[in-house]
Amino acid sequence: MTYLLWISYKGTNYAGFQVQPNAPTVCAVLQDAMQAVLGQRPDVKGCSRTDAGVHARRFALSFCYTGRVPMQKLVPALNAHLPPDIRAVDIRPVPDSFHARYAAHAKTYHYYLLNTRVDDPFLFDTCHRIWPALDLAAMQAAAAKFVGTHDFSALCASGSSAAAHGDTVRTITDCTVVQSGDLFTISVTADGYLYNMVRILAGTLVQAGLHKRTPDSIPPLLESRDRKQAGPTLPAKGLFLERVEYPGLDAIS
């Protein structure tokens, strides 16, 4: 039986999701819990390879399990063996051909900015602080320019395997910025992402918010395919994988 498992985690203490040698990762900790509960260590297929320090509210993964533990008991059993910064949230059976990464229709990321002079001790590891004051309208106008199907090479960090193969065209269906008090939330929904794409996009929107670039500079930036013309790569701590969409499964995602 193949299962789709949804987890939520705070990535501060981990070197990303994917298992790595000599570094704690979300996947390794989850597989430790699976070993304790299931008596085996299933091969896990994650929906994304989140970087060190990146968080996830709804991260999807698939795995095959043929043992005797009932599905309805897996979530509480896993949580009994997981640290408090990683939680199993929901589980359901899926077709054996299902793969959490390749079946994803779209993913939504949020990037959180705290626009204050002083860090908030309760948010410092989940938001990136920016000062001086940001112009929300300018950021919103710039964000709208990213929507559509484009070559996003200019928003791709070096070392991307996709860029090395020339696979840099993606479709952003939604890109917005909202403000609630001092908190700015950048939301991006796309069919796929390049290496550090959202963090570079967020850095570019911050430049617009600081009047260091205009919204009309975004189309020429994308056409240039030049990473040097985009904004800085903002820290990982402000980035959250918010949602993963699967056709026919969106009700629980």
Image (cartoon, helix red, strand yellow):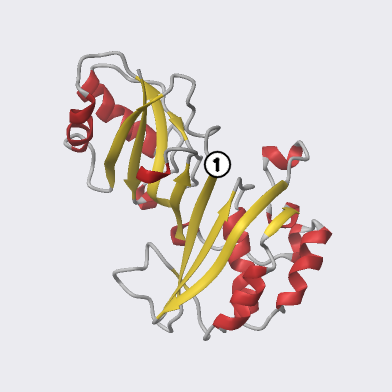
Asked whether residue 157 is in view, the answer is: no
Indicate the quadrant containing the C terminus: top left, top right, bottom left or bottom right.
top left
Q: Which residue is mark 1?
A: 105
Asked which quadrant contains residue 26, the reply is top left
Q: Is residue 119 at least partly visible in the picture? A: yes
Question: In this rendering, would 165 be left or right of 186?
Answer: right
User: Where is 39 relative to 9, above or below?
Assistant: above
Residue at 76%, 65% in the rendered image: 229
- Up the image or down, 22 lies above or below 42; here it is below
Q: Quadrant of the N terminus?
A: top left
Could you tell whether 60 is left or right of 48 in the image? left
Q: Secondary structure at mark 1?
A: loop
Q: Position of residue 164 (x, y in %)?
A: 75, 38
Q: Amino acid at mark 1?
A: His
Residue 202 drawn above or below residue 33: below
Nearest the viewer among 20 and 91 is: 91
- Local packing at callout 1 (Cα closer than 10 Å; few below 14, some 14-19, many 20+) is some
Left or right, residue 43 beside residue 122: right
At horizontal 33% and vertical 75% (from top left) the residue drawn is 120
Residue at position x 41%, y 26% in the image: 44
Report the side of 64 relative to 48 (left or right). left
Q: Position of residue 101 (x, y in %)?
A: 52, 34
Question: Where's residue 67, x and y in %?
Answer: 25, 14
Residue visible at 66% across and 83% down in the picture = 211
Q: Position of residue 17 (x, y in %)?
A: 43, 39
